[in-house]
Amino acid sequence: MKRLFLAVCAIFATLSLFAQEAAPAAEEAPKAEWNKGIATTIGFSQLSLMQWAAGGAGQLTLNTYADLYANLTKGKILWANELQAGYGFIESFETGFKKSDDRLIFDSKLGYKAAEKFYLSAVFNFRTQFAPGYKGDVELVSDFFAPAYTSLGLGIDYTPAKNVAINFAPLTGKVTMVKPQELRARYGNAEDQFARFELGAQLKVDAKLEVQDFKVGTSLVLFSDYLNKPQNIKVLWDVNAEAKITKFFSVTLRTNMIYDDNVLVPKLRKGTKDEYYDGKGIQFKELFSIGFTYTFGEKKK
């Protein structure tokens, strides 16, 4: 641990040397520039059947998503903030209510330009969900703050291109919080442990592409815990794609992939059709929708 601390200090000291520049005697104070706004998406569908010979079930579906952002640049200071909130449900007239999407994510990055395309950075993340989630309609498997993840990493931010950012934080603290005691084992916590701490290294890659009426953004996070099985890399990969149909309507596709060997997921037992058990594996979610989109404020840079 002492060697790790000295290595991090050496990285910061080296980049600080590259950052030294002769400042003019009468330099004006840099102006603060904000880029802020809210991008919203709402998708809705309804199906009703009456004496339908082919069978089926009537249902209502609703998907909502909001992306709030506030980014500040002032001289060599960069401060980027983003809050993502999404919720969707399916109301079947035969099987009842089930949520289809549920996320609450906050990201904040504070950077100081140390050299061309390099920033000394601090990166914060918080992630949870709004509402209870169930397996088999009766067994509670998630809720607000069950789980909730928060992390803070210190390191270097590298921007090789305008729409690409690579952040390496060799000193990252991560906390997994689970409020209900009966759910703690499912997310790697002991039964009497509300919060579990991890210390490790994190690599985060953000990229986006925009061509006319089509845009796609992706975020990949890799984390290795120094304190417990560092070879088991945790993976979090999000992709958001949107294609405009008209000024106010668009087609959106959002995917989420997670791998965390501390988390138990439902797995189908071999040789059966509907027999599940809790085990370790990849989590994947895909949401496709057509709906109303509108941006309040400035276009996100």
Image: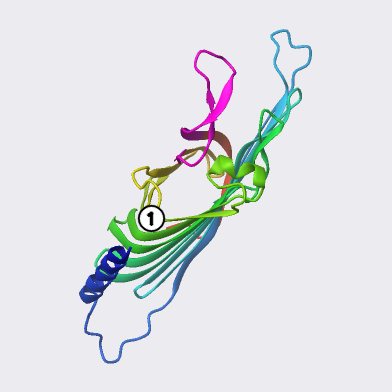
- Amino acid at dot 1: Gly
Q: Is residue 64 above or below residue 284?
A: below
For label 1, the residue is 200
Question: In the image, is residue 273 part of the stretch drawn in magenta?
Answer: yes
Q: Position of residue 43 (x, y in %)?
A: 62, 38
Please tell me which residue lies in front, 271 or 92.
271
Residue 143 appears in the rendering = no
Looking at the rendered structure, the number of numbered marks drawn on it comes to 1
Please tell me which residue lies in front, 68 or 108.
108
Q: Is residue 271 above or below residue 115?
A: above
Which stretch is magenta?
Answer: 258-285
The type of colouring in the image is rainbow
Please tell me which residue lies in front, 53 or 295.
53
Q: In the rendered image, which quarter is residue 274 located in?
A: top right
Q: Is residue 82 left or right of residue 203?
A: right
Q: Position of residue 136 (x, y in %)?
A: 67, 28
Q: Position of residue 261 (x, y in %)?
A: 45, 39
At a point 53% along the width and 36% down the height, the residue shown is 264
Q: Position of residue 262 (x, y in %)?
A: 48, 42
Circle 1 sits in a helix, a strand or a loop, which is it? strand
Q: Is residue 30 left or right of residue 94?
A: left
At a point 61% along the width and 47% down the height, the residue shown is 191
Please tell me which residue lies in front, 24 or 124.
124
Quadrant that contains the N terminus: bottom left
Quadrant that contains the C terminus: bottom left
Q: Dot 1, how many residues are within 10 Å of its Cα: few (below 14), some (14-19), or many (20+)?
A: some
Q: In the rendered image, which quarter is residue 156 located in?
A: bottom left
Q: Is residue 16 above or below residue 60?
A: below
Residue 192 appears in the rendering = yes
